[in-house]
Amino acid sequence: MPDSNESLTLDLQPSSSSTKASNVYTSTPFKFIVEGNVFYLHAALVSRHSRPLDRMMNGDMSEAQKGYAVLEDVDEGTFGRFAEWAYEGYYTPGQVIDRSLDSPSPGESAIEDGGSVRPIVSPPDISQLEEALPIVDVEPPITIERRSYAPVSRTHTGHKKRYKEYHRHIRSPEESSSATGSSRIQLKESFIHRKATVRRDSISVPPPHPNQGPEEDYTDVFLSHAQLYVFAEKYDIKTLRKLALENLQNILAIFTLYEERTGDIITLLRYSYANTSESIWAIEDLRTLLTHYVGYEMDTLMKDEDFRDLMISDGGALLGDFMKMVMERIS
């Protein structure tokens, strides 16, 4: 049996985990400047999460020599959420904005869109949309199998050719309403029941707040997750990237898409497609998630002229992803 002195010595030995924590919090803080605001983060903590940022602080880059970094590719809110997550294990999303406080004057019909007011456009007859989006007779399983596809042509000519290829699957709205309704229900069910991995283990993550009416603007909420995803992808922070994706899925799954709030989703789609690369379908990414969501909310979204324009803008990237998903489900 060890004597009392030996026992005392053994008791005072720090554990490996406490040693690592001590090394992190006793490391020299590194200075980050974002939109003119200064953040000091422990260098060892940042290095643990991101190799690119580690090289910036400790490698041969000019930032390491100067002792600070000016980040031009991120906004203050997003970097603040990264810092919050690095220290706390979770982050606080953007805020819901109550648009009833800036409603139009009496007698003026308008839809609020990102804080601005625009006239209501009468929704088109759904039958007129067949040329823009085929109605597909499918009986898909809830679990979607991911397959690899060659890059999709981003030309409008290519889209017209694809429509012709899919024409044999098109039915009239009367013939296919039951089948398409069932398909959208299954799409929604599979979206809602996506398995979380990072969020599941983050016990401090607060539950999302479902919207209660069309006056609640969720644009900032959606963008906060998407912007953090883009930041994490650029700086190779895999756990944060996955958490942001799961948090976005979580709120979209309980979001009621009122016609007045399609602008919230369109803003999210525009940002996401402008700041991410083409999906690799073996990997769950932001575009894949949003394509899945669009699939079961297509009826409501297609009533918005801005969404119809988005489907064919920038070479039709969103349309191409959507058609890939359709082809997966009928193959």
Image (cartoon, grey):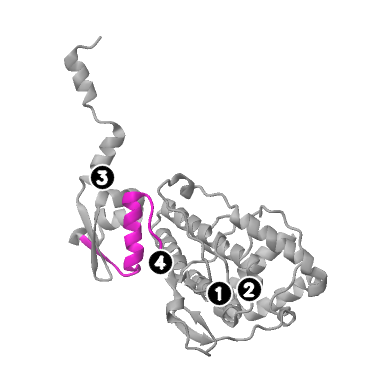
Residue 146, given in percent of the width and then of the height, sits at 63, 55
Q: Which numbered disc, 3 or 1, marks the residue that appears first in the sequence?
A: 3
Query: What amino acid type is highlighted by mark number 4?
Result: Gln
Residue 293, given in percent of the width and then of the height, sits at 59, 64
Q: Which mark is residue 95?
A: 4
* Number of marks drawn: 4
Query: What amino acid type is highlighted by mark number 1?
Result: Thr
**Disc 2 vs disc 3: which is toward the camera?**
2
Q: Which numbered disc, 3 or 4, marks the residue that appears first in the sequence?
A: 3
Q: Is residue 117 left or right of residue 59?
A: right
C-beta proximity under 8 Å, tags 2 and 3: no
Q: Nearer the viewer, residue 52 or 99?
A: 99
The region drawn magenta spans 68-94
Specify few, some or many for label 3: CA neighbours under 10 Å numbering under 14, 14-19, or 20 or more: some
Q: Would residue 328 be seen by someone viewing this image from the given angle?
A: no
Residue drawn 66% across and 55% down?
Answer: 144
Q: Which residue is mark 3?
A: 24
Residue 105, given in percent of the width and then of the height, sits at 47, 88
Q: Is residue 4 left or right of residue 129?
A: left
Indicate whether 126 appears above or below 208. below
Estimate the spatial distance between the alpha carbons at disc 2 and disc 1, rounded to whole Å: 8 Å
Q: Secondary structure at mark 2?
A: helix
Q: Secondary structure at mark 4?
A: loop
Estimate the spatial distance between the alpha carbons at disc 2 and disc 3, rounded to whole Å: 49 Å
Q: Which mark is residue 300?
A: 2
